[in-house]
Image (spheres, rainbow, N blue to C red):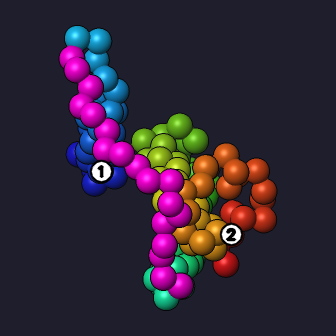
């Protein structure tokens, strides 16, 4: 089994188990949630600067890996005469999809750090195209 498929299966399993844990089943009692204070979360500016720098660096890494993956996929399809639906081509497309998700995650974390570290929604982040590239 290729490493990317193994990683995908592991991530799928972890996500499924986490979803089962978070979703209450009909016959069991839901544990009490701890009380949350409405006070704003105080995060130091130094830590937010570190998070912005780290997420910006990782987003650039995932961008470069994505460009290399697109070049590799184009070479497979055009240069090696593999079809668009060949096994290697689909594996490259899956790897590119994972890189895009990793990049989006870093961009979202960078945006949250720019907003002051508070809890924000993904829909607010995606509403503006200017926020997609980490600054």
Does 32 appear above or below 34? Answer: above
Confirm whether residue 110 shows in the render: no
* The C terminus lies in quadrant: bottom right
Q: Is residue 83 or residue 135 the one in the foreground?
A: 135
Q: Residue 126: percent from the left, percent from the top? A: 70, 52
Taking the view exactly as shown, the residue that stands out farthest to the top is 27
Q: Nearer the viewer, mark 1 or mark 2?
A: 2
The numbered dot on residue 40 is none
Q: Was residue 36 drawn as part of the magenta stretch in this picture?
A: yes
Q: Circle 2 sits on which residue?
A: 133
The residue carrying mark 1 is 7
Check contact, mark 1 vs mark 2: CB within 8 A: no
Q: Is residue 16 above or below residue 121?
A: above
Within 10 Å of the Cα at label 1, are there few (<14), some (14-19), or many (20+) other Cα atoms? Answer: few
- Residue 130: percent from left, percent from top: 78, 65
- Region rendered in magenta: 28-45
Residue shown at 27% from the left, 34% from the top? 32
Identify the element where label 1 is drawn: helix
């Amino acid at each position: 089994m290729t490493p990317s498929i193994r990683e995908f299966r592991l991530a799928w399993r972890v996500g499924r188990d986490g979803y089962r844990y978070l979703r209450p089943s009909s016959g069991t009692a839901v544990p009490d949630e701890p009380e949350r204070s409405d006070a704003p979360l105080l995060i130091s500016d130094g830590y937010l600067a570190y998070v912005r720098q780290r997420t910006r660096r990782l987003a650039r890494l995932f961008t470069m890996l994505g460009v290399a993956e697109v070049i590799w996929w184009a070479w497979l399809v055009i240069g090696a005469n593999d079809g668009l639906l060949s096994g290697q081509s689909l594996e490259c497309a899956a790897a590119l999809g994972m890189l895009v998700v990793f990049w989006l995650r870093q961009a979202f974390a960078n945006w949250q750090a720019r907003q002051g570290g508070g809890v924000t929604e993904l829909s607010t982040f995606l509403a503006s195209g200017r926020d997609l590239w980490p600054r």
